[in-house]
Image (tube, rainbow, N blue to C red):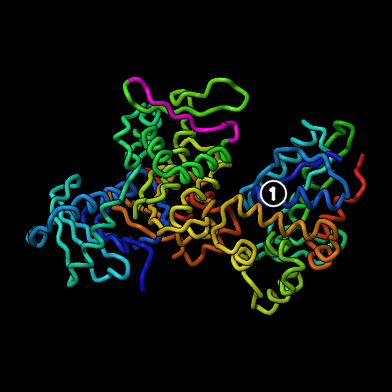
Amino acid sequence: MKVALLSESPADEAVLRVLVDAILGEPAKITPAGFRARGWPNVLQVLPAVIRHLHFNTDVDTLVVTCDSDDSPVHTEAHEAPQYYHPHCRMCQLRAVFRQTSKRFPTAHGRLKIRRVVGVAVPALEAWLLCGRDSDVSEAAWINGQQAGRLPYTRAELKFRIYQTERPSLPHEIECALRETERHRSDLRRLEYDFPGFAALMKDLKSPAQT
Amino acid sequence: MHSVNVIDTVVFHNFKALRNTSLHLSLFNLVIGPNGSGKTSLIQALQQLRTLSQFPLGNDMIHTRSGGPEISFTFSAPYSAVVAQLGCASDLACDFMRVESRDAAAWLKVKSRLATLRSYVLDHNAMAQSSAPVDSTALASNGSNLAAVLAARRRDAPEAFARLEAELLRLLPEFTGIVLDEESDQRVRFSLGIDGAGEPVRAENLSQGVFYLLGLLVLSFDPKPPAVVCIEEIDRGIHPRMLREVRDVLYRLSYPASFGEKREPVQVIATTHSPYMLDQFRDHPDEIVITQKIGHEARFERLSDRADLPELLRDGTLGDMWFSGVLGGVPEER
């Protein structure tokens, strides 16, 4: 499997590299320079061009895209219904971009389309990093908080719990993120269970390629 | 309560385009706005404060004037009772200062901190030049004594120099080290060792961005930095993907504890015209100052005062919102 990554920061990309290997159970061939978006909704803006570039100009077969949900509606089981599309759910939006962009692609480099792998961290990647360490942090806790109008934590609080500062340097951010990701490497089940936005990424990555 | 800021507020009256506006300064301030909207004027005002604060206090002539530019400064706790007022003969020359304070010792302490204030408009051509070793106490405003400052730092603060060098090599991994040479005329010249090549790259052959990054690192890793640092165009010459690193280099000045540094924080006033740079401050809108210019008059606004900011960020990045004009701080079109 030849994998490309599209993420919002070098720290996110470092985490993704570890998680992709852990999901596949072996080191993937991940392109050295990841694609980068400047936060949401820039991910949506650059994604079609990245998909087209990978399809026609490279032999990459898989594109992994992740973003934070921030305070957008969380993707739920109801969104998985056939033909369902939630206009503000980032998972639905990213999947739609994949679908629409590659709808009429001709076969190139031996594959019909790039394998779509989408993950949405609720509300931010730091929640994935805290999974298993901080029992208060889970996708369900966030959804319950959204419904109750009282969020259990803020994105800034999650970041502080990981980095111990509101302004981590990039190397410190990457170091802390990788340290936490190491906990997940050998056993992804807790992350998969507590964060359906990650489970979706796992499922996509394990799906067969469309040739 | 003791504040880490030095300058708390600046109030402008008829100073260039800043006809009637004020600004509360935070510890870190990134000022954005169109050309001619008062970003540089703000920094010039701070320079005038530094200069005049070092002279013996004058009389009350400022109050006998009328209509001339005036700038007032207040300072952060524990010096919040000190007010310094500058009177200017013109937009270019402030020549009077009056200090209101019941506590003379407080003013002396403020004055000693203001004496260290530095402002920078780095110039890569000047930075490439060799420099005299005596000219090395602080980086010159255009960075022209960069080589001498590096040599002095290596000699006087080898640990700080080593950390600066390590950070440079992390950011620009194609280089292997800073090489300093004293020439026959005793001037100091620097070059950067390069991976896999014999000869180091001489300063005059380095790219602009390398100079600007090196200049920022020299400031950021200064073991005894100024209390206040003003830097114009912090993104200049730097690849957009490196701007997060530039932000971190500057944050090191203002938030040393976050970077494992044990020294006083530095109050930073920086300017940029880059939407990509602005994107780096999405989580800290309280650090963004937008200059709004209408006609010939400009005023300051804090981005965090925008009540609708969370909604705006759902529709685009901070940089996109600035470019679009939604945040203001864009050139007028006629």
Q: Position of residue B275 (x, y in %)?
A: 50, 46
Regarding residue A104, the answer to whether it shows in the image is: no
Give SS at disc 1.
Answer: strand
Of B305 and B252, which appears nearest the observer? B252
**Residue at screen point 64% across, 72% down:** A153
**Residue at screen point 50% across, 50% down:** B278
Residue A111 falls in which quadrant of the image?
top right
B290 lies left or right of A102: left
Regarding residue B51, the answer to whether it shows in the image is: yes
The residue labelled by disc 1 is: A7
Is residue B181 in the magenta section? yes
Q: Position of residue A126 (x, y in %)?
A: 68, 61
Of A51 and B109, which appears nearest the observer? B109
In which quadrant of the rendered image does the N terminus of chain B lie?
bottom left
Q: Amino acid at mark 1?
A: Ser
Q: Position of residue A176 (x, y in %)?
A: 66, 57
Q: How many marks overall?
A: 1
Tell which subunit mark 1 falls on: A
B161 lies left or right of A149: left
In which quadrant of the rendered image does the C terminus of chain B lie?
top left
**Residue at screen point 85% across, 60% down:** A187
- Majority secondary structure in the magenta region: strand
Q: Position of residue A130 (x, y in %)?
A: 71, 65
**Extreme residue toward the bottom, this view:** A148
Residue B254 vertical placement versus B150 (above, below): below
Of A72 and B288, which appears nearest the observer? B288
A18 lies left or right of B130: right
Q: Bounds of the magenta span?
A: B173-184
Is residue B308 in the magenta section? no
Neighbor class of circle 1 (other Cα within 10 Å; few <14, some 14-19, many 20+) is: many
